[in-house]
Amino acid sequence: MEYAALRRNLSSWLTQDRTYTEVLEEFGPPSVLFGGDNPFYGRTLAYATEETTEPIICFHLWNGSSEESGKSWPPIHREPLLLAVRSGRGAFTDTFTFTPEGRRRRPDIG
């Protein structure tokens, strides 16, 4: 998918929970992969364009255990889940969007 289309479709696409496979199927291979290919570990997929004035779009994926199990290993998911995407310039809070799963896992800082 071209970068401009990725940016256009992003906000509506993040209204549902997504997996690593869904990100790749929708947006194609990333410009940069932070992390490895092991499905038991999280990673970040970064998409960029040759136009240096355009921001990098980073998909933050996580794979871990459930809070109920009390165990940190093994992860309970077959592949990493998308928790959040950062896109744009400016303040972190203005450029970071959580998926529904990301909002559920976000710590309550009271």
Image: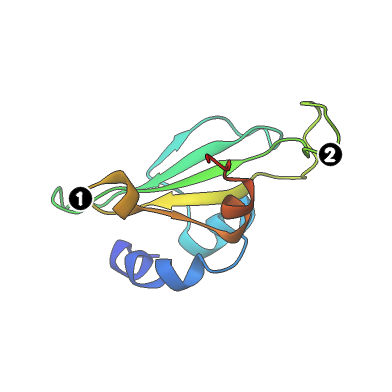
Residue 87 x %, y %? 33, 53
Q: Which mark is residue 103?
A: none
Q: Is residue 87 above or below residue 42?
A: below
Q: Left or right of 45: which side holds 102?
A: right
Q: Residues within 10 Å of mark 2 (few under 14, many from 20)?
A: few
Q: Which quadrant holds residue 39?
A: top right
Using the image as rendered, state which of residue 12 and residue 43 is in the foreground. Answer: 12
Quadrant assignment for the N terminus: bottom left
Amino acid at circle 2: Glu
Q: Of the residues under marks 1 and 2, which one precedes in the sequence?
A: 1
Residue 18 x %, y %? 61, 59
Using the image as rendered, state which of residue 1 and residue 59 is in the foreground. Answer: 59
Using the image as rendered, state which of residue 80 and residue 16 is in the foreground. Answer: 16
Q: Residue at x 56, y 49 (%)?
A: 83
Q: Residue at x 29, y 48 (%)?
A: 56
Q: Residue lying farthest right?
A: 69
Q: Secondary structure at mark 2?
A: loop
Q: CA distance from mark 1 to mark 2?
A: 44 Å
Q: Is residue 68 above or below residue 104?
A: above
Q: Residues within 10 Å of mark 1 (few under 14, many from 20)?
A: few
Q: Secondary structure at mark 1?
A: loop
Q: Which mark is residue 50?
A: 1
Q: Residue at x 57, y 30 (%)?
A: 36
Amino acid at circle 1: Glu
Q: Is residue 16 above or below residue 59?
A: below
Residue 9 x %, y %? 40, 72
Q: Left or right of 43: which side holds 66?
A: right
Q: Residue lying farthest front?
A: 110
Q: Is residue 16 above or below residue 109?
A: below
Q: Residue lying farthest left?
A: 53
Residue wearing tag 2: 68
